[in-house]
Amino acid sequence: MRKLYRKLVFMRNPLSNVRKNVNSHSGRAFSDRKWIIPFFASLLVSISLFLSTIFGLFNAPDGGDQLPFDIISFAKSEDSSGYFVEADLKKSFNVSGNWKVEAPRLAYLISGTKGDSHRLLRTLQAVYHPRNQYILHLDFEAPPRERLELTATVKNDPTFREVENVRVMAQSNLVTYKGPTMIACTLQAIAILLKESLEWDWFLNLSASDYPLVTQDDLLHVFSNLSRDLNFIEHTKITGWKLHHRGNSIIVDPGLYLSKKSDLAWTTQRRSLPTTFKLYTGSAWVALTRTFVEYCIWGWDNLPRTILMYYTNFISSPEGYFHTVICNTEEFRSTAIGHDLHYIAWDNPPKQHPISLSTKDFDKMVKSKAPFARKFAKDDPVLNKIDKELLGRNDTSRFAPGAWCVGSSKGGADPCSVRGNDSIFRPGPGAKRLQELLQTLLSEDFRQKQCS
Ligand SMILES: *[C@@H]1O[C@H](CO)[C@@H](O)[C@H](O)[C@H]1NC(C)=O
Ligand SMILES: *[C@@H]1O[C@H](CO)[C@@H](O)[C@H](O)[C@H]1NC(C)=O
Ligand SMILES: *[C@@H]1O[C@H](CO)[C@@H](O)[C@H](O)[C@H]1NC(C)=O
Ligand SMILES: *[C@@H]1O[C@H](CO)[C@@H](O)[C@H](O)[C@H]1NC(C)=O
Ligand SMILES: *[C@@H]1O[C@H](CO)[C@@H](O)[C@H](O)[C@H]1NC(C)=O
């Protein structure tokens, strides 16, 4: 409906403008020259009619043919969509064929709650690369002291201080599990990353209980070879009982207006299913392109805003907001790759939360070829195994080392204390695994399932 309305507006207005212009011009021409032109015109018409009758060429006279022809050619040559601001904005969607030469940059949001600051830092160090941007968020439940400590640690780190690519959100948002306050927090982090006009190509969302299974060198190397319009967002259309359970229910998130945390409230009222867009759901873990998140945040098209308002009363909005926006936007639908780049294990049958991964899951994690996994208990021994075997990180190194770490590691020194060229990568076995995963994800078979 939205699309149709816009199309109608596009078609009608430019033509009516053109017609008005043509009429007024010709009107003026006649009145200026008073009788001379009509006289000669009618004389010409009479003569040509006379001649054409004589020669048997029953063609329409030139004068009569000229005017309509002009209108058509004018309307055709002038692109009617140029009258509307949306047309220019839509051009910014088109990044296909935009294979930048420069290596990509990623922007990470890493969020946590009370007691998470240490493992949040550990995850940050494991995914750290000077090319990237990082924004850290501890929610409202974390005491102010914990946030101050985190900020101090970031401030005192010589690498973070020099590169200036790690930020801690000073504002602590009240985030309700499965509520819209969670999506609001993610959107705020994206808005900060855009506002600072930092250079980055993909936005990724992690929590303190996530951990990488490949190095950033692996990830950046493989993503260098990727079209920068691909969004990794696991999604399916909501159907069956789930559609009615989720679509008809109305929830209220008190986190939107109360200063103290409380659970989501379910109302007894029901609402009808949306008819202007279709509902999709999927994983809350996403890797989205800058173009797509700009579309969601800036809102020059009303759809992302309308859907955000709709999701205010929808259960589990982080598992549906971006999914519904992307699949209902013609320009982005084909860019949605149905994978969240995570290894997540569930009980059978699935419970509310995924299984906490441990050493016995190590092989399965590696086999999945996913670049990230969740969730991990704080300081679980498997994290040390990942550090050592997958990230090449040991006690002496703060970060999972990459080609940018050019210092000496002699005598327990940190090689990353000396920074080299950050657009050179040293891909390892992780890059090979990720490349294989992407080959599957980008295959015709897989992409046919997009938004269906
Ligand atoms: C996007 O850009 C490419 C190359 O500049 C062009 O070939 C293609 O037609 C454009 N697509 C759209 C939908 O405008
Ligand atoms: C880049 O992508 C092409 C095909 O899309 C593939 O053949 C090639 O191996 C990739 N190169 C790297 C370094 O990943
Ligand atoms: C982003 O990450 C957080 C991790 O804390 C998660 O809870 C949230 O649902 C994620 N997704 C979105 C779309 O906000
Ligand atoms: C790990 O530590 C040893 C010394 O204990 C050091 O020789 C080695 O270079 C370190 N490896 C990495 C990848 O930093
Ligand atoms: C870093 O490496 C890239 C790729 O090899 C090169 O183009 C660039 O000039 C280097 N930058 C610096 C500052 O040496």
Image: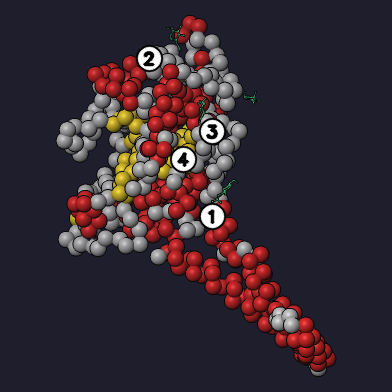
Residue 25 numbered tag: none
450 or 285, which is in the foreground? 450
Residue 164 position, x and y percent, is 53, 32
Q: CA distance from mark 2 to mark 1?
A: 46 Å
Q: Which residue is mark 4?
A: 230
Mark 2 residue element: helix
Residue 414 lies, with reference to residue 95, above or below; the image says: above
Inspect the image, locate mark 4, and give the three-letter code of the amino acid beneath it. Answer: Leu
Residue 244 position, x and y percent, is 21, 55
Q: Which residue is mark 2?
A: 388
Mark 1 residue element: helix
118 or 40, which is in the foreground? 40
Q: Which residue is mark 3?
A: 104
Residue 449 position, x and y percent, is 35, 43
Among numbered discs 2 and 4, the one appearing first in the sequence: 4
Mark 4 residue element: loop
Mark 3 residue element: loop
Inspect the image, locate mark 3, and give the three-letter code of the amino acid beneath it. Answer: Pro
Look at 37% across and 33% down and name the residue there. 341
Q: Which residue is mark 1?
A: 90
Inspect the image, locate mark 1, and give the three-letter code of the amino acid beneath it. Answer: Lys
Q: CA distance from mark 3 to mark 4?
A: 13 Å
Among numbered discs 1 and 3, the one appearing first in the sequence: 1
> Is any atom of residue 122 visible in this view?
no
Q: Residue furthest top?
A: 411
